[in-house]
Image (spheres, rainbow, N blue to C red):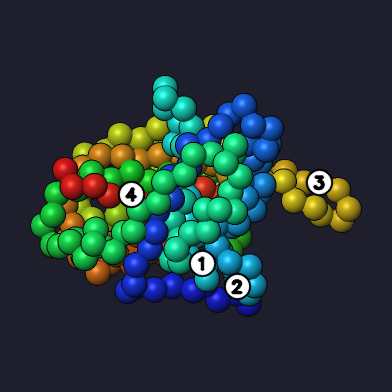
Amino acid sequence: MTTLTTTTTGTAWLTQLRLNTRNRTVLRDLKDGNQLHRTLMRLVPDGLGEPARATAGMLYRVDETDAGITVLAQTRQQPLINRIAPDYAHTAVKDMTAFLARLHKGLHVQYRIAANTVVQYGSLADRERAQTRLKLDRLPPARRALTGAEADDWWYIRAARNGLNVLSLVSTVPPSVDVTRQHKGRDVTHRHAITIFQGDATITDPDAVRATILNGMGRGRSFGAGLLSLAPA
């Protein structure tokens, strides 16, 4: 059984990669979360063992604006930006030590997170109860993506558990993240539903917030979900 590496102390570095969307490797990575994950893991040393992502503290998010596409990649080790080709992206690195130290109870912040909003049912009985509660004409799958008000509730609950009191919320649904892997000699593509949450909040538990920033939140952390970004409001 895999044991995740988590921490409640320490620091991290945030690497901003402004992608060159004329680059063929960039276009390949944007189409497949597994390929993008592999490229970003070049920012950390080889030989970290398993699970390498958790050991490195690698979390990332793809942000798309009118100005272009940017990837924010967070690591617990100083990133090896020389391992990212210059024509792949323009990179800038920020040490997060001072920022993490300034977080305190009552601080008003702006937040942004891309989350894999899913619910997983542990048993057939759980699925049957969900079918009745949701008035479905068939059993829901063992893992069900949440959308709309259900996704918003997911965020409110998890934000509170992780030291944030949400004051405002805007949620958007970007395209799903496709992840292609080999299974029995052929490529199999899995689709990960993502919801982006952003708004204002106050910090209720600084230690919990730091732990969430360092470790991420929820599922899909290898494929662009779970990175919590905060800035003073």
**In the rendered structure, which disc, 1 or 4, sits on the residue that comes first in sequence?**
1
- Mark 2 is surrounded, within 10 Å at the Cα level, by few (under 14), some (14 to 19) or many (20 or more) other residues, namely few
- Residue marked by disc 4: 229
- The mark closer to the camera, 3 or 2, is 2
Q: Which of the labelled discs sits on residue 48, or is there none?
A: 2
The answer to which image quadrant residue 160 occupies is bottom left
Rendering coords of residue 41 (x, y %): 59, 57
**Cα distance, mark 3 to mark 1?**
27 Å
**In the rendered structure, which disc, 4 or 2, sits on the residue that comes first in sequence?**
2
The answer to which image quadrant residue 86 occupies is top right
Q: Is residue 227 visible?
A: no
Labels 1 & 2 near each other (Cβ < 8 A):
yes
- The mark closer to the camera, 3 or 1, is 1
**Cα distance, mark 4 to mark 2?**
25 Å
Could you say whether the residue bearing mark 4 is in a helix, strand or loop?
Answer: strand
Q: Is residue 225 left or right of residue 151?
A: right
**In the rendered structure, which disc, 3 or 2, sits on the residue that comes first in sequence?**
2
Labels 1 & 4 near each other (Cβ < 8 A):
no
